[in-house]
Amino acid sequence: MENMENKEFTTFEEQIKILKIRELKFGSEETAINALKRYGYYSVINGYKDPYVEIVDGEEQYKDGVTFEQLFSLYSLDRDIRNTIMKTMLEVEDNLKSATAHVIAEDFTSNTNVYLARENYRPGRKRKDKYQIDELLNKFNKILTDSTDPVKYYQENYNNVPPWILFKQASFGNMVNFIKLQRGPQKNKIISLLYNIPVEIIEQYSDLKDFFMDTLFVCLDYRNRAAHGGRMYNFKSKPTFRYQKFFHPSLNITPEDYRKGSGRTGIPILLKALNLWDNEHLSIISTTGIEFYCKEHCKNYQSDMEFLMDFLFINKDSDNSPATY
């Protein structure tokens, strides 16, 4: 099979010729060349051709009627989804850091030496000679030596950095793993704040705590995927959701469906999980945005609805618009 990445350098005009040989149609070759200049052949073509190609006599060929404009529209849709996911994850990160800082300060004070004491937390897994909590505390202590504000300001003026300042400088991944290592009372309080559910209820249901941690690790994988420019619309995270009786039936996913692979990961599952948080803004910036972009793409390329339905819960009975997540 002919493959661009195994060939020598080609000009943009030569790339167009190769695509025409493979039966890809063009509304405007000039517009296509401009798109390839801006975003690159690999990102646009190799990243989004899969729904549009078939193998004929051992060679890759575009299906009848497929245009560059259609393929590029899918690329643009995915870029909009990626930006929306990234914006959603920034909101999630802010919520996590705020809730965690509040609980840590409430239970252990805002004194750095006190709230960063190792005995406050579970040790986690041991890797080589260090437990996970030791690695995290080392990273937090490095942040305390940061020479930029606001850490520098608090060190110079108060000789102390409260958790709400320290956590602002921590990575999303560090915060997710730090929350995982919270002891029961603190983790329950964090969940209580994020879901607006009484702590007493959370203490009774371990399933909710499992679901919360599943949500965080799925979020982390999607956040990292988006940050590195990966394809999003059909991305399946490595971390997955365990089946939960209080969650999956609301998506019409039965235990049998789950065993066959449904409801484990995917953008609709993730956004539905985040809709349970006590933050309507999350739903507005994520679900509404993705619905709009999908509708715009499918308005022009209705045939794409069939494969997009597998990943984005599009409702083809609703004026080409995606269903509510």
Image (tube, rainbow, N blue to C red):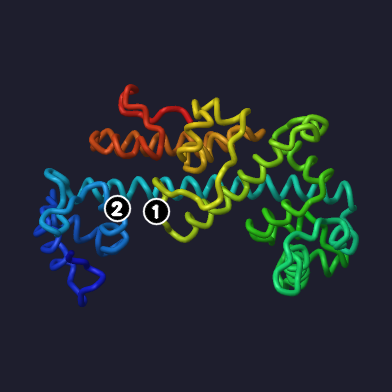
Frontmost residue, 170 versus 160: 170
Residue 2 in percent (x, y) is at 17, 66
Amino acid type at circle 1 is: Arg
Q: Is residue 13 above or below residue 226?
A: below
Asked whether disc 1 touches disc 2, contact meaning CB atoms under 8 Å apart, the reply is yes
Q: Is residue 292 left or right of residue 143?
A: left
Residue farthest along the bottom direction in this orientation: 8
> Is the residue marked by circle 1 packed among few (<14), some (14-19), or many (20+) residues within 10 Å?
some
Point out which mark residue 231 bears. Answer: 1
Q: Residue 47 location, x and y as percent?
A: 31, 57
The residue positioned farthest toward the top in the image shown:
317
Q: CA distance from mark 1 to mark 2?
A: 8 Å
Determine the residue positioned at 27% across, 33% down. Answer: 299
* Residue named by callout 2: 48
The correct choice, above or below, for 159 with respect to 216 in the image is: below
Q: Decide if residue 229 is in sight here.
A: yes
Q: Is residue 88 left or right of residue 105?
A: left
Regarding mark 1 in the picture, which secondary structure is present there? loop
Q: Position of residue 134 (x, y in %)?
A: 78, 67
Write down the quadrant of residue 145 in the picture.
bottom right
The numbered mark, 1 or 2, whose residue comes first in the sequence reads 2
> Which of the 4 quarters of the picture holds residue 210?
top right
Q: Residue at x 32, y 36 (%)?
A: 296
Mark 2: amino acid: Tyr
